[in-house]
Amino acid sequence: MRPPRRVLTALLAPLLAAFLLASAGAGAVEPDEVLDDPALEARARGLSAEVRCLVCQNESIDSSNADLAKELRILVRERLQAGDSDAEVKAYLVDRYGDFVLFRPPLKPGTYLLWYGPFALFALALIAVVVYLRRQSRAKANAPAALDAAEQAELARLLGDEGAAAPNDGAPPGQGPGQGKAP
């Protein structure tokens, strides 16, 4: 007798979730890169998560499989084993590759655009939308009102077309209401 699918799902779902969580932390770090000291390895993993892969540009070196990312992971671990602090390792990488190598570049005049640029663009877009909406509401408010019957009659008289003021009632062009075809 086979167990129902619900039972199998209930048993296998936690195992699958545990497997996925365990493998998610692995990243691209290869076994030969892992340090023997767990404290140093934890610091190296933390730093690697903050450093941008210069090849992939949208991944950390911790999760990238690019050759340069591997070299940078090894470099970070070598610097930590040499006794550098986390700040010294970051400073070394910034000296070599510039502020772009960090996912969170330092706040200084050279990086103000990186930090405040998105907010400035959002503010400009918001201002543009407000200006557009105000212009639209002013255009609607300044739109001429529809002509009343007296104005339509005056317009028709000025244009010399007395039939223009009366509705056409679906008659073909040139035939006004009451001007049906002759029998």
Image (tube, rainbow, N blue to C red):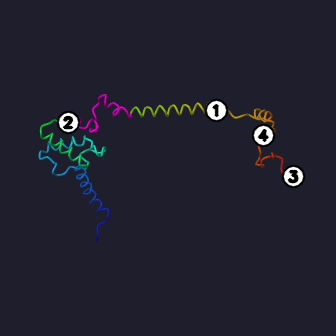
Distance in Å between CA atoms under marks 4 and 2: 84 Å
Residue annotated with mark 1: 143
Q: Quadrant of residue 165?
A: top right
Main SS class of the magenta portion in the image: helix
In the image, residue 25 above or below residue 100 = below
Q: Using the image as rendered, state which of residue 26 and residue 107 is in the foreground.
A: 107
Q: Residue at x 34, y 34 (%)?
A: 114
Residue 107, given in percent of the width and then of the height, sits at: 29, 30
Residue annotated with mark 4: 164
Q: Is residue 183 magenta?
A: no
Q: Are marks 4 and 1 in contact (CB under 8 Å)?
A: no
Distance in Å between CA atoms under marks 4 and 3: 22 Å
Q: Using the image as rendered, state which of residue 150 and residue 155 is in the foreground.
A: 155
Residue annotated with mark 3: 182
Distance in Å between CA atoms under marks 2 and 1: 65 Å
Q: Amino acid at mark 3?
A: Ala
Q: Are marks 2 and 1 in contact (CB under 8 Å)?
A: no
